[in-house]
């Protein structure tokens, strides 16, 4: 058999099973024909017999082969299931879909945070004391809830879109009428809609490196070619984008310019202007993902790309996930009405429009005086946690850690000197009750870590860093 490789991401036994299945489907191994014995095939492929046994187990579970005691292994006489029932090969089906799963390590991090009581330096959400629970509960008890409980407009509730139009003008200096706004189930659904509706397989897109986008399978699921834009302390350099465009004809650019995830960097004003000029000159849309601009520790307004966009080349995405509550599932996208109509049509096919309940609550909160006081408190608390995390890391690691200090957002990007494995360190940290995200999951080289300080409380942060120091030593850290 050709193409069996021990270095491939798919296990050997699955590779063997797939190749045998292909030969059965092509008719090379017909119904009733004998397959090589487990021992013979193992010798032929230079693998352990147990590997071939696992491959045959897989094929037997799928109903493709039968084992006859004393005779050997044959291709099923009823391979197409004409004479008897067959159990679906669910494992095969889950691996064959076009929508790719999250990376295994990301699934592990999520599972650990959901199933165990850990100090969470991984999740991109707020701790319970930063969520305005009392205010939201008070807003949910008035008598003026709309009685209409039918399908909402696919583009979103009109009252919420009008409130968001005023909100963005006041807080983000973005002029956007309600007709140019669409409500989504968080920012991630907005990204999915853009990818599915505005791009096609084979298109080249540019993303930051490191970047949260790097960890998302949605680009590869859509068959896109992704190219990286290095991020330094001033964000991405538009000159790199120009070079990529000359080489690959970039179709779209995805950026998180304000307190970027994971580095916390802020794209400089000079680069913003240069980037917008390049976008306009070449007709390349920019997708601005902006969950953090209202978290500026200094309270100085951060100019979004969209607020500087004079030619309509930016599609703007934001949400309430990082600044109010992740469970509200309220995000939005701003762009030309024709684009909003296209995305709304797709969303209608997915879910018939967003639920009225979170939209109604978000509308009341954004339009209330309590929103202003909440953002003020959030900025203060996040600044304190950022400083506390920086101080704790300096205390425990000294000059063995380099940090990219942020002026807003919820992430701290660190590089630890010496030799160590991100996966091993994560395993040791989880044993000690702390979880974080290794930097290589965002496309960075080994040695980097993203710590998120929005979820952990002020009491937990010093303890988390102390446990992390113990995990470093246990993981064989060579300074």
Image (cartoon, rainbow, N blue to C red):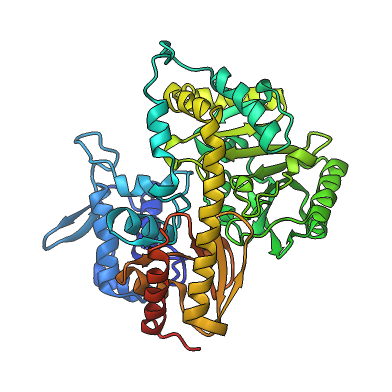
The image position of residue 398, as x and y in percent, is: 53, 83
Count of picture labels: 0
Write down the quadrant of residue 366 in the picture. top right
Left of 281 or right of it: where is 315? left
Name the one closer to the observer, 15 or 425.
425
Residue drawn 52% across the image and 44% down it: 323
Q: Which of these two is toward me, 187 or 139?
A: 139
Residue at the spot 57% in from the left edge and 66% down from the top edge: 413
Q: Where is residue 123 in the image (x, y as percent from the top left)?
A: 44, 55
Q: Give how far across and how far down residue 70 sits, in percent.
A: 11, 63
Q: Which residue lies furthest to the bottom in this view?
A: 479
**On screen, residue 472 above or below 270:** below
Left or right of 113? Residue 220 is right
Front in this rendered view, residue 79 or 85: 85
- From the viewer's side, name the closer residue of 440 and 128: 128
Above or below for 36 versus 378: below
- Residue, far top: 147
Image position of 76 (left or right of 21): left
Q: Which residue is drawn at 30% across and 39% down?
A: 80
In the rendered view, tell whether residue 253 sits above or below residue 135: below
- Where 473 sits versus 451, above or below? below
Residue 26 visible in this rendered orientation of the protein: no
In the rendering, at what x and y percent does residue 384 appear?
A: 52, 60
Query: Quadrant of residue 190 in the image?
Result: top right
- Of all residues, the one furthest to the left in this rendering is 70
Q: In which quarter of the image is the N terminus?
A: bottom left
Q: Can residue 370 be seen in this view?
A: yes
Q: Quadrant of residue 141?
A: top left
State the residue at coordinates (26%, 73%): 49
């Amino acid at each position: 058999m050709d193409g069996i490789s021990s270095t491939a991401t798919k296990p050997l036994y699955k590779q063997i099973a797939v190749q045998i299945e292909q030969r059965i489907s092509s008719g090379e191994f017909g119904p009733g024909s004998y397959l090589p014995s487990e021992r013979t095939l193992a010798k032929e492929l230079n693998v352990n017999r147990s590997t071939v046994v696992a491959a045959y187990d897989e094929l037997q579970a799928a109903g493709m082969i039968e084992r006859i005691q004393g005779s050997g292994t044959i291709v099923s006489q009823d391979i197409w299931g004409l004479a008897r029932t067959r159990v679906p090969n669910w494992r095969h089906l889950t691996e064959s879909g076009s929508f790719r799963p999250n990376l295994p390590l990301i699934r592990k991090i999520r599972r650990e945070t959901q199933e165990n009581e850990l100090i969470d330096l991984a999740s991109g959400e707020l701790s319970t004391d930063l969520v305005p629970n009392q205010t939201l509960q008070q807003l949910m008890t008035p008598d003026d809830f709309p009685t209409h409980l039918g399908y909402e407009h696919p583009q979103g509730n009109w009252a919420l879109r009008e409130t968001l139009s005023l909100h963005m003008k006041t807080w983000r200096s973005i002029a956007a009428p309600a007709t140019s706004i669409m409500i989504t189930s968080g920012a991630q659904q907005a990204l999915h809609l853009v990818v599915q509706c505005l791009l096609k397989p084979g298109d080249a897109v540019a993303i930051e490196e490191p970047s949260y986008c790097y960890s998302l399978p949605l680009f590869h699921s859509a068959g896109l070619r992704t190219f990286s834009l290095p991020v330094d302390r001033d964000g991405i350099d538009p000159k790199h984008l120009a070079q990529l465009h000359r080489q690959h004809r970039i179709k779209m650019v995805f950026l998180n310019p304000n307190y970027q995830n994971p580095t916390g960097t802020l794209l400089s004003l000079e680069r913003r202007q240069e980037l917008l000029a390049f976008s306009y000159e070449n007709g390349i849309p920019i997708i601005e993902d902006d969950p953090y601009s209202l978290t500026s520790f200094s309270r100085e307004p951060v100019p979004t790309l969209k607020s500087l966009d004079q030619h309509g080349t930016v599609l703007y995405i934001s949400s309430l996930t990082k600044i109010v509550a992740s469970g509200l599932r309220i995000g939005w996208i701003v762009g030309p009405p024709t684009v909003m109509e296209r995305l709304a049509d797709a969303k209608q096919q997915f879910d018939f429009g967003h639920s009225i309940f979170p939209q109604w609550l978000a509308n009341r909160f954004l339009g209330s005086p309590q929103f202003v006081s909440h953002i003020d408190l959030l900025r203060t608390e996040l600044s304190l946690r950022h400083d506390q995390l920086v101080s704790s890391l300096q205390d425990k690691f000294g000059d063995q850690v380099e940090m990219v200090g942020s002026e807003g957002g919820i992430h701290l990007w660190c590089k630890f000197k010496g030799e160590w494995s991100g996966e091993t360190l994560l395993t040791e940290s989880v044993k000690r009750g702390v979880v974080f995200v290794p930097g290589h999951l965002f496309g960075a080289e080994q040695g980097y870590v993203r710590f998120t300080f929005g979820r952990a409380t002020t009491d937990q942060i010093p303890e988390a860093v102390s446990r992390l120091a113990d995990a470093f030593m246990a993981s064989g850290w060579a300074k």
